[in-house]
Image: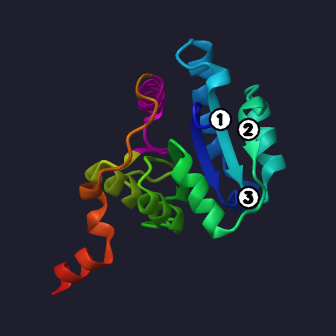
């Protein structure tokens, strides 16, 4: 899998009012279209899932004929989750942004920063201008798609760029230490002094 372009999602799929929200669908749709447009080769991409909801993830991927790119790790320890994310090219995270759930930053965001892998965040909800998008853009940590914004075309461009980077350089560059230092304890402590 190391030679393949790899996206990892570690954790549960989130439900709201008993319905799983559709952030993997948005990603699978973009990957499917990039494959159809011959920008990505299906055999050169993996989507690693670590969590208890693989059958749901698989059913979402099947809608786009992408079940063959899935790799199911099942439920894993935090240590194994961090190892998986560190070996991946992109880490997928997801949050909600609506009137009841504003400004939420997932713990997975901090794990991605810890292993310094580029983040693909998908923000569900009807409200734009999420805190997560602001942080990701200002700190150059990856890409954030908000359902409330018209970011889908930009998502496809970003995925294509990262895929090409992996193909040409053999690796997707990690997040710069300078971009993550503001999240480190010693940096925060100096700011408070």
Question: Looking at the rendering, which quadrant does residue 3 occupy?
Answer: top right
- Establish if 68 lies above or below 187: above
Residue 20 x/y as whole percent: 72, 53
Q: Pick out the residue farthest to the bottom.
A: 193
Q: In this rendering, does residue 125 appear at all? A: no
Q: Is there a contact, CB below 8 Å, between mark 1 and mark 2?
A: yes
Magenta segment, which residues? 143-167
Secondary-structure class at tag 3: loop
Q: How far apart are the two marked residues, 2 and 3, measured between alpha carbons?
A: 13 Å
Few, some or many residues within 10 Å of mark 1 (<14, 14–19, 20+): many
Where is mark 3, residue-wise?
51
The disc at residue 70 is 2
Visual colour scheme:
rainbow
Query: Residue sitting at 29 percent across and 57 percent down?
Result: 177
**Residue 66 lies in the magenta stretch:** no
- Establish if 89 lies above or below 15: above
The disc at residue 46 is 1
Q: How far apart are the two marked residues, 3 and 1, measured between alpha carbons?
A: 16 Å
134 relative to 154 in the view: left or right: left
Few, some or many residues within 10 Å of mark 3 (<14, 14–19, 20+): some
- Establish if 81 lies above or below 159: below
Mark with earlier residue (1, 2): 1
Query: Residue sitting at 79 percent across and 41 percent down?
Result: 58
- Establish if 149 lies above or below 18: above
Q: Main secondary structure of the magenta part?
A: helix
Secondary-structure class at tag 2: strand
Mark with earlier residue (2, 3): 3
């Amino acid at each position: 899998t190391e030679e393949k372009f790899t996206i990892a999602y570690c954790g549960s799929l989130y439900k709201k009012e008993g319905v799983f929200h559709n952030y993997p669908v948005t990603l699978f749709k973009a990957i499917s279209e990039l494959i159809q447009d011959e920008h990505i080769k299906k055999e050169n991409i993996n989507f690693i899932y670590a969590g208890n909801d693989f059958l749901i993830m698989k059913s979402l991927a099947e809608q786009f004929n992408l079940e063959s790119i899935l790799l199911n790790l099942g439920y894993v320890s935090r240590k194994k989750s961090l190892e998986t994310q560190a070996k991946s090219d992109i880490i997928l995270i997801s949050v909600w942004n609506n009137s009841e759930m504003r400004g939420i930053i997932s713990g997975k965001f901090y794990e991605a920063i810890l292993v310094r892998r580029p983040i693909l965040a998908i923000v569900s909800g009807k409200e734009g201008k999420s805190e997560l998008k602001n942080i990701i853009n200002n700190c150059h940590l990856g890409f954030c798609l908000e359902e409330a914004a018209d970011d889908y075309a930009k998502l496809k461009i970003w995925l294509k760029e990262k895929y090409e980077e992996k193909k040409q350089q053999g690796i997707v560059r990690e997040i710069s230490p300078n971009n993550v230092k503001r999240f480190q304890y010693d940096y925060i402590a100096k700011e408070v002094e």
